[in-house]
Amino acid sequence: MEIKNAIFYKTIMKLEEMPKEGLFEIALTGRSNVGKSSFINSICNNNKLARTSKTPGKTITLNFYLINNSFYFVDMPGYGYASREKDILYNFSESTNLYVEKRKELKGFISIIDSRTLTNDDKEMIEYLKHRSIPFIIILSKIDKLKRNDIRKRVDIISKELSVNKELIIPYSSYTKENIDKVLNSLETNLLFS
Ligand SMILES: Nc1nc2c(ncn2[C@@H]2O[C@H](COP(=O)(O)OP(=O)(O)OP(=O)(O)O)[C@@H](O)[C@H]2O)c(=O)[nH]1
Ligand SMILES: [Mg+2]
């Protein structure tokens, strides 16, 4: 697929404010600062679309982006930052929590994991998605920080640790856009038309 058109739709604080047209939604999840907002900007070719920051905790609401006039990306607050000791699910704000639990339009997740470090929060998130049978793909972010040879090794290790098929794990860099074709194909086949 190709992303021809991406616009900021709205920021949502309560479930009542969600779009009512019934379009599919693909949510972005991952640790704070892992590069969720940068990922959206990168694959949509617009660095002004989503706000990014060096400081974790930048995205604090659900932000909807309308893609190709046909589905939404939903940028979510990151986990693992605000209250590290607590269970990952309690790290979500109430509206995020309700969104994941109740939203029928939510078709699946793009789970972003730092290619260099897999955390317990990441593991819990993937367990949660599996447990609820929610479709997901995994993007290993920031591969521009890894040596060539290490990229494939990290995919192997993370695939084993999470018990997730390698086909669902795509190494990516929002800076260099390496593997963007694979990302878009996987989004299409595993999430949008699954
Ligand atoms: N080297 C490198 N840095 C990246 C990449 N993607 C994002 N970053 C940097 O990582 C930092 C966090 O990026 P964000 O996109 O704001 O991360 P986020 O996951 O949306 O963070 P929260 O909204 O706080 O949960 C920023 O300084 C980005 O420039 C990447 O592919 N490579
Ligand atoms: Mg963000």
Image (cartoon, rainbow, N blue to C red):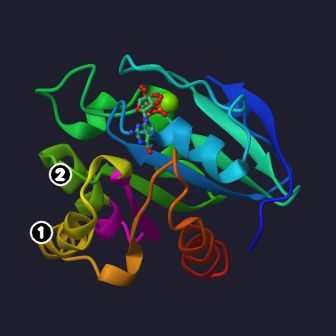
Label 2 or label 1, whichever comes before in sequence order = 2
User: Which secondary structure lies at badge 1?
Assistant: helix
Identified at 32% across, 38% down, the residue is: 31
Give how far apart the Cα atoms at labels 2 and 1 are: 9 Å
Q: Is residue 36 above or below residue 60?
A: below
Label 2 C-beta lies within 8 Å of the nearest ligand 1 atom: no
Pointers 2 and 1 in contact (CB under 8 A)?
yes
Residue 118: numbered disc: 2
Identified at 17% across, 36% down, the residue is: 87
> Is residue 35 found left or right of 8 in the rendered image?
left
Disc 1 crowd, CA 10 A, few/some/many (<14, 14-19, 20+): few
Say which residue label 1 marks. Answer: 161
Label 1 C-beta lies within 8 Å of the nearest ligand 1 atom: no
- Identify the amino acid type marked 2: Leu
User: Which secondary structure lies at badge 2?
Assistant: loop
Residue 135, how many percent across, how many down? 46, 71
Q: Quadrant of residue 160?
A: bottom left
Q: Is residue 112 above or below residue 13?
A: below
Q: Quadrant of the N terminus?
A: bottom right
Q: Quadrant of the C terminus?
A: bottom right
Q: Nearer the viewer, residue 3 or 8?
A: 3
Q: What segment carries the magenta color? A: 129-143
Q: Is residue 87 magenta?
A: no
Where on the image, by quarter, is ligand 1? Answer: top left
Q: Nearer the viewer, residue 179 or 138?
A: 179
Q: Quadrant of residue 133?
A: bottom left
Q: Nearer the viewer, residue 122 or 98?
A: 122
Disc 2 crowd, CA 10 A, few/some/many (<14, 14-19, 20+): some
